[in-house]
Image (cartoon, rainbow, N blue to C red):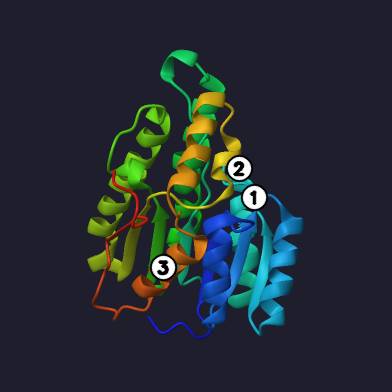
């Protein structure tokens, strides 16, 4: 895909991977729809992007609320008339052992990581089908390929994302020329770890960060750029990307 003047919708764009992807796509000529709940952070990000010659729009969006998603998609289409790239990035990761019964956190992960992705896909997909083109990126994880104690529900949600992504590719790519990529990062420096309320697992993550050099959001953004710039007949269906020092 040639990126100049293309349009991307990026959820969870206020920090971490979403912010990194937004900055890199904008630097390569993509007009970015910056979607998240924290609009002040989005406005600061858009100001940086515009300062570098990029273009975009702030979209107040909660992926668990379909009304805000449809409103955001409508605003993006009203401004640019098209959507070419969807980055389903919004996600949360509050780790804990099953026996601690942090049920509210379980439900929040399902609501954001699975239902949020489904909600956003459902809002954008009709436009991509109408255009007979597009590229969808779904943020899965190493936890969508492997299993880890303490990550039971998170692993379940990310396995669901990986499965949905591959079937989406099977159903949509040949029929509508919509490419689908499942991104499966290992350890990345983001705000995800700030959501861990369990003291043991928060310490484990802090210890891990001292033992290896984590990936950066920019590393993941470069993976997105590689996949989206591939020739139209090439679908990079999965990108499994890890820190060099990550042995598991």
In primary-sequence order, the first of circles 3 and 2 is 2
In the rendered structure, the answer to whether residue 69 lies left or right of residue 245 reads: right
Position of residue 100 measured from the top left corner of the image (x, y, whole percent): 49, 15
- Figure quadrant of the N terminus: bottom left
- Mark 1 secondary-structure assignment: helix
Up/down of 74 relative to 203, above or below: below
**Inter-mark Cα distance, 2 to 1:** 6 Å
Up/down of 192 relative to 98, above or below: below
In the rendered structure, the answer to whether residue 97 lies left or right of residue 68 reads: left
- Mark 2 secondary-structure assignment: loop
Residue 132 visible, this angle: no
Q: Residue at x 33, y 67 (%)?
A: 178
Residue 114 visible, this angle: yes
Q: Tell me the number on the disc at residue 68.
A: 1
**Foreground of the two, 86 or 156:** 156
Q: Residue at x 44, y 61 (%)?
A: 126
* Residue ID for mark 3: 224
Contact between marks 2 and 1 (CB within 8 A): the answer is: yes
* Residue ID for mark 2: 65
Position of residue 47 measured from the top left corner of the image (x, y, whole percent): 74, 72
Q: Residue at x 33, y 61 (%)?
A: 181
């Amino acid at each position: 895909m040639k990126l100049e003047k293309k349009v991307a919708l990026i959820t969870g764009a206020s920090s971490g991977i979403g912010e990194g992807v937004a900055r890199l796509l904008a630097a390569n000529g993509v007009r970015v729809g910056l979607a998240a709940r924290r609009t002040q952070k989005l406005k600061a990000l858009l100001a940086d992007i515009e300062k570098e010659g990029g273009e975009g729009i702030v979209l107040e969006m909660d992926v668990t609320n379909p009304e805000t998603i449809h409103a955001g998609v409508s605003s993006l289409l009203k401004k640019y008339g098209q959507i070419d790239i969807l980055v389903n990035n919004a996600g949360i990761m509050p780790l804990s052992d099953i026996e601690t019964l942090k049920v509210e956190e379980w439900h929040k992960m399902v609501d954001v990581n699975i239902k949020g992705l489904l909600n956003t896909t459902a809002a954008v997909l009709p436009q991509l089908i109408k255009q007979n083109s597009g590229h969808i990126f779904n943020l899965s994880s190493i936890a969508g390929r492997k299993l880890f104690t303490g990550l039971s529900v998170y692993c379940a949600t990310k396995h669901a994302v990986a499965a949905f992504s591959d079937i989406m590719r099977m159903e949509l790519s040949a029929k509508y020329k919509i490419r689908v990529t499942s991104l499966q990062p290992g350890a990345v420096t983001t705000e995800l770890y700030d959501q861990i309320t369990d003291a043991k697992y928060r310490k484990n993550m802090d210890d891990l960060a001292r033992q290896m050099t984590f990936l950066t959001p920019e590393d993941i953004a470069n993976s997105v750029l590689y996949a989206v710039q591939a020739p139209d007949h090439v679908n990079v269906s999965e990108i499994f990307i890890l820190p060099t020092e990550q042995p598991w």
